[in-house]
Amino acid sequence: MEVAASDLDNLKATELRLGLPGSDAPEKPAPASPRGSKRALLEANEEHRPGKSKSLEADSRDQEAQPVAKARVVGWPPIRSYRKNSFQARKAEVEAAGLFVKVSMDGAPYLRKIDLKLCKGYQELREALDNMFRCFSIGELSGMEGCDGPKYAITYEDKDGDWMLVGDVPWEMFISSCKRLRIMRGAEARGTRSSP
Amino acid sequence: MREERSDMSEDEDGGGGSAKSRGGGGAPPPFSDQVLENVLENVLQFLSSRGDRNAASLVCRSWYRAEAQTRRELFIGNCYAVSPRRATERFRRVRAVVLKGKPRFADFGLIPNNWGAHFHPWVCAMAAAYPWLEKICLKRMSVADGDLSLLAYSFPNFKELSLICCEGFSTAGLAVIAEKCRHLRVLDLIEDYLEDDEDEMSDWMSRFPETTTSLESLVFDCVGSAVNFEALEALVTRSPALRRLRVNHHVSVEQLRRLMALAPQLTHLGTGSFGSAAAAIPQGGNNVVDLVNTFAASKSLVCLSGFRDVAPQYLPAIYPVCANLTSLNFSFADISAEELNPVIRHCHNLQNFWVLDTVRDEGLQAVAATCKDLRELRVFPVDPTEDSEVSVSDVGLVAISEGCRKLRSILYFCQQMTNAAVVTMSKNCQDLVVFRLCIMGRHRPDHVTEEPMDEGFGAIVMNCKKLRRLSVSGLLTDKAFAYIGKYGKLVRTLSVAFAGNSDLALRYVLEGCTKLQKLEIRDSPFGDSALLAGLHHYYNMRFLWMSSCKLSVRGCNEVAQRLPHLVVEVIRDRDEDDDGEFVEKLYMYRSLAGPRTDAPPFVKIL
């Protein structure tokens, strides 16, 4: 998770625009020349294919309006459904299992959400949270300890509804029981120490 | 991996020749001729190629009869080209049948369900005519559990069943086969779609005979439901002849190891998931060591496939067998070039390799560096959409062409390609028989020069003199088809999609490709006048498929009238109304049986 992207997300989310949702140009750098030339070619080809079927016309118009979400043509590319299903089933499993939990930080005006599946361990989690709340925090969350102990503690609410300190249990166990995260600040955090 | 056996290959000689033969034998011959015929039979029984047999049967009536009596393997390339009764009346001593049904575009969802290709009338006719039948191989047929049951009860000597890309049956049907076919040697289920109700699944694995079996091949990687593992283990234990075993993804790597230990004589192995059962056993180092040892003990392995949910830490376990492998199917394994490299480096003898494009051009370069004997390569896309990331490209293609000079067959999915790369391949790989390039973006030109891909495909037909099967893609003008018509004299199967500018393109092909047998076209601007340009040739073809082109009912009607032995089917999508003049899908094929009687309402036969 890059800082730039998430900041941009915030900005874009608050920006007032006219237009249907999803009609923006994609933010990720799309390979410029193939797409550009493809559009030009589509227009050029209009003359060559005057009688193409209705569905195809709709497709090409879709393609030009929404480069991100292309209309799919039946049976193209020619991959057997047997093969497609094998991957789609797994992809769906993996994507559906994305674990988004709310993250609150004491003093912050709004909450965030983080996908625990994208972090491979506690270190990454700390870094991700650090990045996410950088604009609100004074110091770092990740393992920095001043002489009076850490200023923040990352806690989570588990399945039983108890608030636990992040870092005690193995990562896999943690993500399976974590319902939400809370970054405690100040006095409440004192007297707690995260496991290394 | 699904091997291209000679009888299933699309490139076999004399396809469907039996449909062209004359009628039955007539009155019985005089005695002296009968003696001659007996002698002839003794000679003709050695003819195995069906092309040769078809030719022999045309010599005279006597030869016709002798050939009919000695044909043991019946190949029907289109189940609607001849009626079951006619086939079983002519050929009376058949032991093995190969039957193909739906056209290939059915695999891509272009043909509505219930279109046809029912096995039922065939199994009924064969049950009566061939009680000694031993082998059945079906491709793209609709097979019901009742059909499998009839099969199991009708053929006491039944030995081999192969179902490829079939649908309509379930584990209940498999249970009957397992139980009743006591001499079963081969049960190969390849890319079938089983109808299985979650609640009503049958424990077919337990139904095999409890005695020692004669099983040589058991392939069930397409069966979606888990099988009874204890029963499978017990079956493997009592099947000493077992050489080919391909399990489905429900079999974990731990279970696989147990099976392999029981059957070290295996030559073909489909590994199932090759990952751990979810969170069942901790992924310690010991597991990998055990697995390595098991593979090391499987000294006969030449073909590996499966790897559905491959956990990369298990991959090194296959190193001991890599040097012996002639065939490796990684096309369901989401692995990177880094993960592929240490494996492929050992595979010096590899001839068939199927892989996912996740290995990228670097992965293909590694293949090219080691697999000097490669004959067949297939590169599949992990994300089969038009706008997925570029992972393999012209770079990989060139690398392969430079490293694998003996390449005969290639299927390559990619997002971008250049003419130069295709030309290079045409020059380096002179043995190419099958060239299938799928540039996934429709109408996509050469990504460097922005020109159409005409020159690349032109070079393929010009330089690869043995080419019999061609699939084209990318931006193509009529010029590409001019090349194909001019140089593709041996081409038998041609697949076209989103290509060409005008009727000329199709004309070039129909007039130039004299050996053309199977032509499938979609979304290309070809109309009636092009269709009519092929009238001289359609009786020589197995079929023509055209969808989303510019055909009208009038044009198709004219073909139907001029060629009475051609069945001309106009298929419309279920939810569309009768579109009047416009023909959305045309499927036409020569037939001795006339219009079929089992056509569903959305099929109109002209």
Image (cartoon, rainbow, N blue to C red):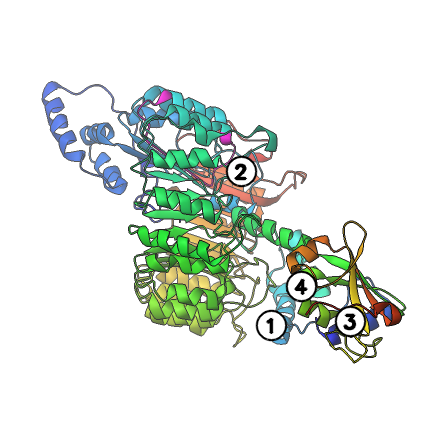
Chief secondary structure of the magenta portion: loop
Q: Mark 3 = which residue?
A: A132
Whether residue B315 is situated above or below residue B546 in the rendered picture: below
Q: How crowded is mark 4: few (under 14 residues within 10 Å), some or many (20 or more)?
A: some
Residues indicated by labels 2 and 3 sit on the same polypeptide chain: no
Q: Mark 1 lies on which chain?
A: A
Mark 4 vs mark 1, foreground winner is 4
Q: How far apart are marks 3 and 1 (CA)?
A: 35 Å
User: Which disc, if any, is residue B190?
Assistant: none
Q: Magenta residues, as a range?
A: B154-171
Q: Do the residues labelled 3 and 4 touch (CB within 8 Å)?
A: no
Q: Are marks 4 and 1 in contact (CB under 8 Å)?
A: no
Mark 3 vs mark 1, foreground winner is 3
The one nearer the camera, B316 or B463, is B316
Give x and y (percent) for residue B219.
41, 41
Give x and y (percent) for residue A168.
70, 61
Q: Mark 4 = which residue?
A: A118
The disc labelled 4 sits on which kind of residue? Answer: Leu
Q: How far apart are marks 3 and 4 (CA)?
A: 14 Å
